[in-house]
Amino acid sequence: MPFIKVENLVHKFFERNNEGEIIDEKNALDGVDFQIEAGQFIAILGRNGSGKSTLARHLNCLLFPHEGSIWIDGNEVKEEDDINIWNNRKNIGMVFQNPDNQIIGTTVEEDTAFGPENLEFSTEKIRDRVDNALKMTGMYKKMNVSPNSLSGGQKQRVAIAGTLAMHPKCIVLDEATAMLDPDGRKELISTVHRLNKEEGITIILITHFMNEAVDADRIFVMDNGMVTMMGTPKEVFSRSDEIKNLGLEMPVMMNVAIRLKNDGYEIPVDVFTIEKLADVYEQLYRKHLNGE
């Protein structure tokens, strides 16, 4: 069975009057279906209001389905099953958009230790998990520093360290790069890719920055509470007209590649990075020198 399996997931938002009576309802998620294998890096894209964050909160049992079902690591999520919910929250770590809402310790070390302490681990195990988590996120040398003195990117890495110290099988980043500058975004994305490759942690990256999705194993595109596209980055971004119709931008380098192709250059359109574009350009230049 896949690590995460979602079948016909529906979640409703209700509008109530002053007496508490329901006067309207809207499907925030409307029949969502997908599967995620252990160890995959998944990017979920979509404009604001598409249902991305609502979906994320279902994966961590912060919300529960009104219809349909979710299976995590072989266990079905049920609102009345407290033990299963607790296990799922240990397996699925969340990193939210604003790290200031997630960091509670007076030092980096104290904040990272908060999760393991609540799991009532021994002092030795807590020490080991905190040290390892801070080393994996590059924050070990900052362990005695106040989080208030850190940059946005560093705060997000502390939030990830606190999640890692609980040894989750999966980390969900819900727009975790939205408040960061370009350097901070690059730093954070590099960290989660390393955790995915070196530690085998399943990563679910929810974002509206297209460039953050180009190295994912698979991409899910959401609109109006539904998954409207699904596939590898090449498969999804090759449908450029559909992407634009959903109000999303194409990755910058792909836009450049498409323009060059439209100008008559023999260039593939699945060019996601500046390094790949430079390689392609070099090949074209060599052909030009050789008279080809």
Image (cartoon, rainbow, N blue to C red):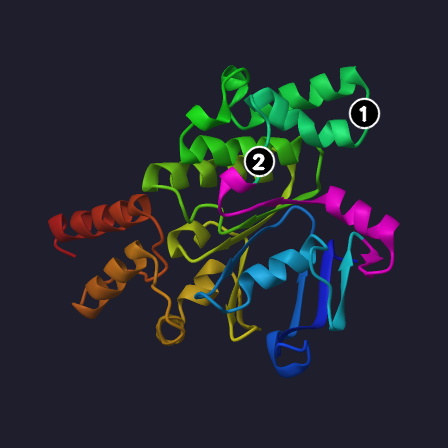
Query: Which quadrant: the C terminus?
Result: bottom left
Which kind of residue does numbered mark 2 sit on? Ile
Picture coordinates of residue 196 (x, y %)?
A: 59, 40
The reply to whether residue 193 is in sight is no
Depicted 267 relative to depicted 49: above or below: above
Q: Earlier in the sequence, mark 1 or mark 2?
A: 1
Depicted 77 relative to depicted 28: above or below: above
Query: Which quadrant: the N terminus?
Result: bottom right
Does residue 51 appear left or right of residue 70 in this picture? left
Q: Quadrant of residue 166?
A: top right
Which residue is rendered at x = 34% and y = 57% of the image? 251
Which kind of residue does numbered mark 1 sit on? Phe
The reply to whether residue 220 is in sight is yes
User: Marks 1/2: CA distance?
Assistant: 19 Å
Q: Which residue is mark 2?
A: 160
Does residue 175 appear left or right of residue 180 in this picture? right
Depicted 218 relative to depicted 274: above or below: below
Which residue is rendered at x = 16% and y = 67% of the image? 263
Mark sitting on residue 121: 1
Picture coordinates of residue 51 (x, y %)?
A: 55, 67
- Number of residues whose C-alpha sits closer than 10 Å to that of mark 1, classed few (under 14), some (14–19) or many (20 or more): some
SS state under label 1: loop
Mark sitting on residue 185: none
Q: Which residues are magenta?
A: 74-101
Magenta highlight on residue 140: no
Q: Nearer the viewer, residue 231 or 289?
A: 231
Magenta highlight on residue 78: yes
Q: Quadrant of residue 245?
A: bottom left
